[in-house]
Amino acid sequence: MTFKIAIPSYQRYKTITKHTLTFLKEHNVDKNNIYIFVADKDEYDLYIENVDDSLYNKIIIGKLGIANQRNFIRYYFDENEKILCLDDDIIRTVSLHDISFLDFVNKQFDYCINNKIYLWGIYPIDFYLKDKETDDKLVFIIGSFYGMINSHDKSLDICAEPKEDYEMSFIHYKKYGKIRRVNWYSVKKSKSKKGGLFCFDRNKINNDAVEYLLSMYPEYIKSIYNNKDGHREIKLR
């Protein structure tokens, strides 16, 4: 295993162990490659006290807010490192093919390095998977599970909280001309809504992010619609 795992987490010090950290242990991931990123010193103290330290290498104080935290993670690790970013509530993988977690991730990083792709991800929902991959067109790379060949280039900074994964997809596609998504692989996550890095006025901040993306990246957005919860969402061209 030659990649690092970054887990941004907020107010989930009581559940991260039974979810993502246990998931990684079950898949024989070396704990020395696992880094947890928290928002501040208060959060740090809670995680140190409650999270099993046999399951991770280090807890790092980063930034509040998922967009800020993702930027912080990029600058924390070295240039050109292979970074796998995971949400803190992953339970298991879902795949159309029989492949181990480590083999899957390593193969995606190898493919991206060989084809000069700097961002890859998985199917954004854990059902209706498709037996194909896409490399050369704009697709949505969901923030819950993605890999990147790390860069400190400031043009890759994101700010569209909480649509930061849309902006990340747009920016990488615009800069490099391709991103990779494996549509036959996904993950199952906990249904709990407590905690997470998005603990603000969800409706307003979500709508503000949609307006921001529409103004900054109109060439990539086909339409705007409301989901079943009444939040504005984006369809890509």
Image: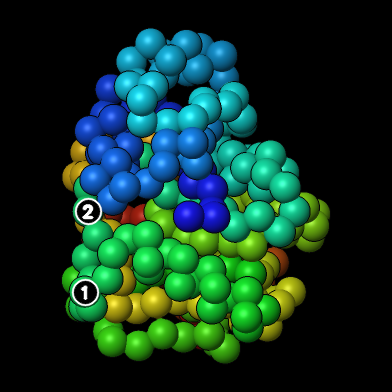
Indicate the position of residue 49 as horizontal and vertical percent values.
38, 11
Residue 127, quarter of picture: bottom left
Q: Is residue 216 left or right of residue 21?
A: right
Q: Which residue is mark 1?
A: 98
Q: Nearer the viewer, residue 133 or 27?
A: 27
Q: Nearer the viewer, residue 69 or 79?
A: 79
Residue at image position (40%, 54%) is 144
Residue at image position (64%, 62%) is 149
Residue 204, placed above or below residue 79 = above
Mark in front: 2 vs 1: 1
Q: Nearer the viewer, residue 28 or 232?
A: 28
Mark closest to the chain's N terminus, 2 or 1: 2
Disc 2 marks which amino acid?
Arg
Q: CA distance from mark 2 to mark 1?
A: 14 Å
Residue 122, quarter of picture: bottom left
Q: Are marks 2 and 1 in contact (CB under 8 Å)?
A: no
Q: Secondary structure at mark 2?
A: strand
Disc 1 marks which amino acid?
Asp
| Disc ID at residue 92 | 2
Q: Is residue 177 left or right of residue 107?
A: right
Residue at image position (61%, 31%) is 63
Report if residue 219 is visible in the image: no
Indicate the position of residue 150 as horizontal and vertical percent values.
67, 57
Mark 1 packing: few (<14 Cα in 10 Å), some, or many (20+)? few
Mark 2 packing: few (<14 Cα in 10 Å), some, or many (20+)? some
